[in-house]
Structures are given as structure tokens and as C-alpha cells.
Image (tube, rainbow, N blue to C red):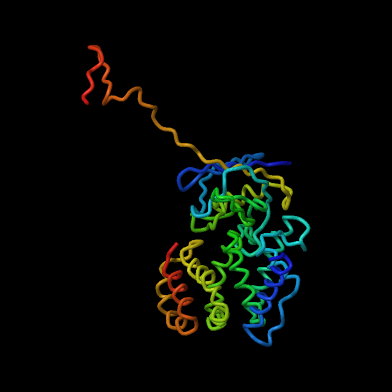
Amino acid sequence: MTAQRLIGCAVALCLSLSSASAQEAPPPDAADAVEMIELMLGRVPARHETPLAAMHGLGALYARLHAGARADTPGDLGLWILLGDIALRSSDAGLTQSFAADLLPLYRQDPDAVLKVLSEAPWLATSACHYLSAYFGSEDRPEANRAPFLEAERNRIREALPGPAAETCFAALSASL
Amino acid sequence: MSYTINVVRKNGSGTLTFKSGSVDISETCWWDEDVVIDAGTYTGYATRMANKTDGTDGGNREAIWLGLNVPYNGDGSTANGFFIHKGTNAGWSDGCIVMPGAKVYQMWSEITPKETGNISVVITDETVKRGRPQDWDCTRYMHSSWGTMPLFE
């Protein structure tokens, strides 16, 4: 497969993920989408001139999408969760620590919105539920709140996600650090 | 001005040392044992983490970024998001090196200018050497003043 076809597929993935969450959602910002594709391909995003700028640029991309997701900006929640999947797959420790701290509060704010994204792209459940799980016990947050959270959300998750994705999520949430 | 941060790892924890001017730090540090940066020397940048708002001075979290394509787990994998930052145990790390926030802040404040690759971060693994090799196999060759004991096959 040529590089152009790979990028084309990834663009289509980003666009479909964004529009799947709300059909009326606008497509993602083109420069942001290209940056995410470059990250998926293991490249340094071309819009940043130096490695340091690339690191800060990635942090800024996270912040924009996170802020958009918290404000219920159409499409941003799906893109933010996709960025989390990229971060986990690429072992970006700075970003994964941020997702571990930030996804669960956003889930508590609007669990149905998060589960809608995961029901439409079930392959994201592995990373998203890893982050929900990683909230507990990391950065001195109490581990004891894990079991009550899982029990409170078990039925909601089971009803929202396809069976295998729900089981993946339960397994992740059951595993302590 | 250039700076050097040394990290010597042992089993599960290590010691980070930094010396510059009146600052002389030797502090316990930790990391996620599932994501272990390969031993080596990396160019570090004193910066802040964009999405952590718990900095010691009230700003974003102070940190030393280790640059792009840092190898980890000794299998050829590389990643871009490793930092030295505050933390009280390995639960603060997904691969970063963490140590108490006051010490990170002391070190970070000493380094100027910020946002510059002016730090050498040297990560080494301590080789534990205890005791000494046995002089002989005492079960086969028992030396004494009466000469060598016979073998008991």
C-alpha cells in the first residue's frame, strides 16, 4: 500500500469517527487531522519546526480537543479519544498520564457521550477503558474507588457497547495498577 | 550553560543526582517498570507539561523533557513523551522518571535558559556485585594440611 493510500485511509478514519458521533458534526480541523495521521505513522508532525515545538504542539492539540470535548463541541470527544488511543499505542508517557487523569472526570460529566463514541468505534474501547481504569491508583488517587465505579457503571456499559467491547472494558476496569 | 542529570537505576528505584551552583541533589526516583527507558545519554529540556496544572509554583507541572525517539524496553521501540517530573512513587509514571516535586522544582529552577536542549540526562543501570568467586569447588576438592581429599564419586 502506498503512503498516499495509507494517509487517505487514515483521513477517512478521522473524518468518519468525527462524523459518526453526530452526523451534523463538522469534519475535524484539517491541520489537526493531518497531525494525528502523522503521529499514527510515527512521524514528527510537519507543521512544527523543531522537536520541542512538536512536543508542545501535541500538548496543545490535546488541550484543544479536551476543551472541546468538555464543552460538548460536536466531534471533539471522538477525536480526543482517538488521540488517546494513538498515545497509548505509541507509549507517549506524558500524554497517557494526562488521559489517565482526565478521561474519567469527563466520563462522569457525560457517560452516554463517551459510550456513544465507543459504541460507534468499539476498537477504541481498549484504550479508553485502560484510561478509565488507570485513573484509580495513579498520581496518588485512591484505588478504593475503583470497585464502586465499576459496579455503578456496569449495566450502562453493558447496554451501550457491543458484547466483546464491553467485556474488554470490564477486564480493563477490573485490573489495578 | 550546560547541565548534567545522572540517574542510576537499581531494582525498582534509583538515585537522581544533579549539581549546579549551590544546588546539590541526590534523591530517590521511580519509573514504571513496564516502560523502561534504555540506559543512555539523552538531551533534556527544562519545560512544563502542557496538560498538567499542578506545578510547584502554581503553573503547569515543571519537567525535563527527554526529546524525540527515546528508546525503551530494549527492543527497538521508541517514544517521544518521556519526562522527569514530580511523583511520589511509580504510580505517577507511564515511563517517565519521577521524584519528589520539591526536588524537581529545585533542579528545574536552577536550569536556565528553559526550553533549550542544555541538559545531558545520563541513565545507567547499576550492576550489583556482591561477594567473590569461590576459590574452588569445595564438594570436589577439599584442600587441607593433609593434602587433597579423595573424590567421592
Judge from the rendering whether residue A176 lies leftward or rightward of residue A80; answer left or right: left
- What residue lies at 62% left-to-right and 77% top-to-bottom? A77
Judge from the rendering whether residue A25 lies leftward or rightward of residue B73; answer left or right: right
Q: Is residue B25 visible?
A: no
Pick the quarter of the image with the N terminus of chain A. Answer: bottom right
- What residue lies at 67% left-to-right and 48% top-to-bottom? B44
Residue B149 at x, y percent in the picture: 23, 18
Q: Is residue A165 above or below residue B149?
A: below
- What residue lies at 46% left-to-right and 76% top-to-bottom? A164
**View extreme (top): residue:** B146
Q: Nearer the viewer, residue A122 or A103?
A: A122
Q: How many marks?
A: 0
Q: Is residue B130 above or below residue A115?
A: above
Q: Is residue B116 visible?
A: yes
Residue B2 at x, y percent in the picture: 71, 41
Q: Is residue A160 above or below residue B70?
A: below
Q: Nearer the viewer, residue B81 or A9?
A: A9
Q: Nearer the viewer, residue A122 or B29?
A: A122
Pick the quarter of the image with the C terminus of chain A. Answer: bottom left
- What residue lies at 53% left-to-right and 55% top-to-bottom? B87
**View extreme (front): residue:** A1
Q: Nearer the viewer, residue A109 or A175?
A: A175
Residue B21 at x, y percent in the picture: 66, 39
Residue A10 at x, y percent in the picture: 67, 71
